[in-house]
Image (tube, helix red, strand yellow):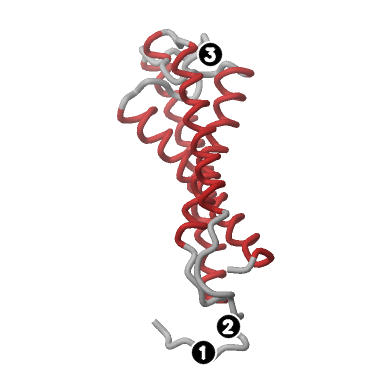
Amino acid sequence: MQQAERGPLLIAGIVTGVGVGGFFDGIVFHQLFQWHHMLTSHGDYPMNTVPGLEVNTTWDGIFHSITWIAVVAGIAMLWRLERKYDTRWSLPLLGAILMGWGGFNLIEGVIDHQILGIHHVRDDLGGPLEWDLGFLAWGAASLIFGWLLARHREGRPVAARQTAAPRPSR
């Protein structure tokens, strides 16, 4: 894929990665491990009371709704690109998704964990800073590794489908 044509792919991958990163955070940390919920560091909504859990579960659902919208938007963008271009984009796309996921971790970790303090990675342990810093390091590593993958030049130059022979319907 030529450099000028990579922009839409990278944007679609990043949007998808933001959604996937949010889903991972919500499903793994909020639901499976139950380390925190959206508002567990806010004193009025502890995760060890029924009223606190009800409020946190509602906000977790709002969070999941937003990440679902990001995944759907990213997939819609990718679908449009797939229908427009004949190319292989596996490594650049994977890189863009990792960039979105890592960027999500960095932004969510700085805003929610550090600035607003509405929750921490391990609220079940009292919110130790080491876990929050590890989350930020994981986000930074994903962002950097994704950026390196996204720069990979893969496949042949792209020819727009409008000028190429039509592809058989699927």
On residue 111, the disc is: none
Give the residue displayed 45% in from the left and 45% down from the top: 20
Mark 1 and mark 2 in contact? Answer it, CB < 8 Å: yes
Residue 22 image point, x, y percent: 48, 38
**For this rendering, which residue is in front, 131 or 113?**
131
Query: How far apart are labels 1 and 3 at the CA level?
Result: 56 Å
Residue with the mark numbered 3: 42
Structural crowding at the residue carrying mark 2, measured as other residues with C-alpha within 10 Å and reported as few (<14), some (14–19) or many (≥20): some
Disc 3 secondary structure class:
loop
Residue drawn at (50%, 70%), measured in percent from left and top?
155
Across and down, in percent, residue 50 comes to 36, 17
Q: Earlier in the sequence, mark 3 or mark 2?
A: 3
Q: Quadrant of residue 74?
A: bottom right
Q: Label 1 sits on what residue type? A: Pro
Find residue 131 and report its image quarter.
top left
Identify the residue shown where x is 57% and y is 23%: 112
Marks 1/2: CA–CA distance: 7 Å
Location of mark 2 (residue)? 161
Q: Quadrant of the C terminus?
A: bottom left
Nearer-N-terminus badge (1/3): 3
In the displayed structure, 67 sits above or below 77; it is above
Q: Position of residue 113 (x, y in %)?
A: 55, 20
Furthest-right residue in this view: 4
User: Where does the image place residue 140, in percent across and percent down from the top left?
Assistant: 54, 32
Front residue of 108/13: it is 13
Q: Residue at x 57, y 16 (%)?
A: 117
Looking at the image, is mark 1 or mark 2 earlier in the sequence? Answer: 2
Q: Which corner quadrant of the image does residue 56 belong to?
A: top left
Image position of 86 with respect to 44: above or below: below
Q: Could you tell me the amino acid type at mark 2?
A: Arg
Q: Are marks 1 and 3 in contact (CB under 8 Å)?
A: no
Image disc number at residue 166:
1
